[in-house]
Image (tube, rainbow, N blue to C red):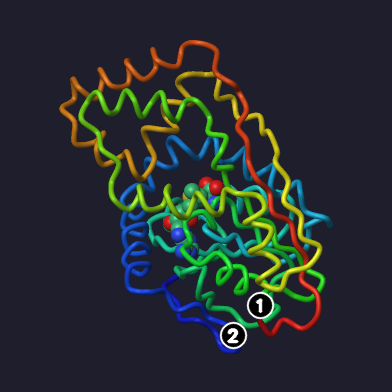
């Protein structure tokens, strides 16, 4: 595992603007600092979402080589390995890939907008909640298309921006009572990146613009056991945009925050979460 340079044969590499480069750097730092917490909290929810995304594959993935893009602490890779696929993880943050490294498949530190692989080397891409962090979604999808063989598939998930699970607002309201403000990078991500990647027609248009074919974007409701307040609280308080704030609280305030957030969620919470699934094929020659 290690940092890598974009591979030979890359085409249409997106060149981020200075503000986008800065935003990518801030997103990287946030994930570098929260791998353990991610694995202890959000990963439980994201594992179920990754399973639903992988289920959307149009052909069995056993025996295939799959790029787990934005692999994080490895929930999608784990499911792919159980299905006898051969995943390779890519992530912007070394700490996310390094988590439990010994039991993980190979991993490469890289940006989705500059994949360090040759043309057509993967049978499938699984990008679980990665595109919603990428300033240039079309550029990232062009890269996905380039590194996937003809006949291969690109699968990607995002959260629909018009349908947020109520735990998000309730836990954020509790956080604010303790003085929390969204970090700047997260505001930029929510206002711009999530707003566009979380819109089904925009995601579909981005896939077409990237030259993918048979493009479908579906909205799924995935059972994630979020009706358990503890699961929902651990999900929200261990996110990269909250974890630093929570860690800096005095121990008694941290306990009080957990109690307040849990109490705020003890009503009727939906157990499922809505997710957009992009599924697209690679046709023709993978030249970008
Ligand atoms: C929401 S987490 C999802 C992690 C994992 N796929 C899962 O479902 O648990 C997003 C991941 O994408 C990574 N990421 C963010 N921007 C990226 C980029 N431009 N290129 C590659 N990875 C990126 C983050 O470091 C983080 O690990």
> What is the number of the mark on residue 112?
none
**Residue 263 located left or right of residue 160:** left
Q: In the image as oriented, which residue stretches furthest toward the bottom? A: 8
Quadrant location of the C terminus in the rendered image: bottom right
Q: Position of residue 35 (x, y in %)?
A: 38, 48
SS for callout 1:
helix
Residue 74 shows up from this direction: no
**Residue 157 located left or right of residue 245:** right
- Residue at image location 77% in from the left, 53% down from the top: 57
Residue situated in front as seen by the camera: 19 or 106: 19
In the picture shown, does residue 147 fall above or below 287? above
Task: Look at the numbered disc 2 and say if its residue's Cβ is closer than 8 Å to ligand 1.
Answer: no
- Residue at image location 82% in from the left, 55% down from the top: 58
Q: Position of residue 26 (x, y in %)?
A: 31, 59
> Which residue does the numbered mark 1 point to in the structure image?
146
In the picture shown, does residue 36 fall above or below 21? above
């Amino acid at each position: 595992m290690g940092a890598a340079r974009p591979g030979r044969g890359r085409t249409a590499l997106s060149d981020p603007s200075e503000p986008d480069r800065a935003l990518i750097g801030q997103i990287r730092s946030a994930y570098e600092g929260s791998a353990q917490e991610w694995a202890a909290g959000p990963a439980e929810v994201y594992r179920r979402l990754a399973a639903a995304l992988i289920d959307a594959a149009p052909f069995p993935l056993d025996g295939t080589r799959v790029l787990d893009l934005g692999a994080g602490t490895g929930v999608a890779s784990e499911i792919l390995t159980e299905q006898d696929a051969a995943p390779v993880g890519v992530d912007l943050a070394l700490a996310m890939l390094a988590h439990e490294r010994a039991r993980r498949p190979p991993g490469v530190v890289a940006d989705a907008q500059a994949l360090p692989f040759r043309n057509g080397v993967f049978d499938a891409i699984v990008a679980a909640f990665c595109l919603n962090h990428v300033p240039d979604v079309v550029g990232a999808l062009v890269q996905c298309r380039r590194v996937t063989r003809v006949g291969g598939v690109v699968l990607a998930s995002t959260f629909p921006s018009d349908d947020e699970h109520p735990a998000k607002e309730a836990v954020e309201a509790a956080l604010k009572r303790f003085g929390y403000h969204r970090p700047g990078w997260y505001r930029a991500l929510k206002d711009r990146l999530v707003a566009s990647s979380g819109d089904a027609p925009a995601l579909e248009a981005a896939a077409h613009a990237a030259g993918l074919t048979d493009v479908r974007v579906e909205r799924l409701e995935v059972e994630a056991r979020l009706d358990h307040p503890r699961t929902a609280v651990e999900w929200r308080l261990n996110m990269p945009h909250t974890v630093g704030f929570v860690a800096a609280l005095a121990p008694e305030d941290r306990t009080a925050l957990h109690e307040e957030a849990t109490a705020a969620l003890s009503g009727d919470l939906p157990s499922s979460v809505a997710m957009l699934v992009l599924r697209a094929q690679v046709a023709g020659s993978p030249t970008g």
